[in-house]
Image (cartoon, helix red, strand yellow):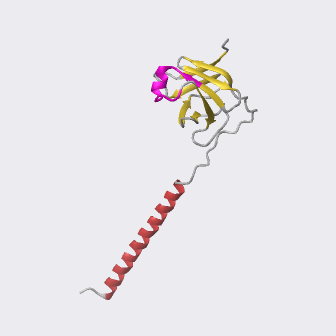
Amino acid sequence: MRSYDDETSTIKRRRGIAWLAALLAALYLLLTLAGCQRSNDAPPKLDTPEPPPHVGYFVSEYGTFTFNGDGETLCLELSEEYLEALGNPPNNETYAYAFTWYDFGTCRYDVATELKLYDESSGTTITFSLFGNATQDKIEISYPVVSDERIIFEKTIID
């Protein structure tokens, strides 16, 4: 037969284990919630003047971006091969565009990671991942591409 002291120590041990388990669960929950906080990541802030918006023709072997100079719209004209790789979006159309820092919103093109295009009439969105930084004379696309190489759109004067 068990003694009163044995039963008391068993109850205390079980309470201690339950308390420790509850403490560990609370700690785990706290750490999980702390890890789920929204990131406050933002585009880098540069101490240089913002570059002027793109204007004119940026040409590659797969097509042309014609920037209207308003900082908001461009005409997209792509080759059949590239259109097919993109899922056949509307071609020779005016798209609204924005340079963005990942999914954290619009930013200057010289720090952007993406170029996003939107055609209002069809609801089509195209997102190009940029390789390096876009400049006033060059936009280099790393995704989506139709070959293993990046696609470089260079500013060109067309007569």
88 inside magenta stretch: yes
Which residue is the extreme one toward the front? 121
Q: Per the image, is 159 magenta? A: no
Task: Name the quarter where the N terminus is drawn.
Answer: bottom left
Q: Nearer the viewer, residue 93 or 31?
A: 93
Residue appearing at x 68%, y 26% in the figure:
68
Residue at 40 percent across and 73 percent down: it is: 18
Left or right of residue 48, residue 90 in this image: left
Seen in the image, is 107 located left or right of residue 29?
right
Write down the quadrant of residue 15 in the picture: bottom left
Q: Is residue 53 left or right of residue 78?
A: right
Residue 150 appears in the picture as rendered:
yes
> In this view of the protein, which residue sits in the foreground, 64 or 35?
64
Taking 55 as reference, is 124 above or below it?
below
The residue stretch that appears in magenta: 76-90
Image vertical order of residue 40 relative to residue 119, above or below:
below
- Nearer the observer, 122 or 145: 122
- Where does the image place residue 148, in percent across and percent down from the top left? 46, 22
**Is residue 114 shown to the viewer in this render?**
no
Q: Nearer the viewer, residue 60 or 142?
A: 60
Q: From the viewer's perspective, is residue 18 above or below residue 31?
A: below
- Image x and y of residue 91, in percent: 54, 25
What residue is drawn where x is 36% and y is 76%? 14
Q: List x then y, in percent, for residue 57.
A: 64, 20
Quadrant, the C terminus: top right
Residue 118 image offset from top left, x and y in percent: 58, 35
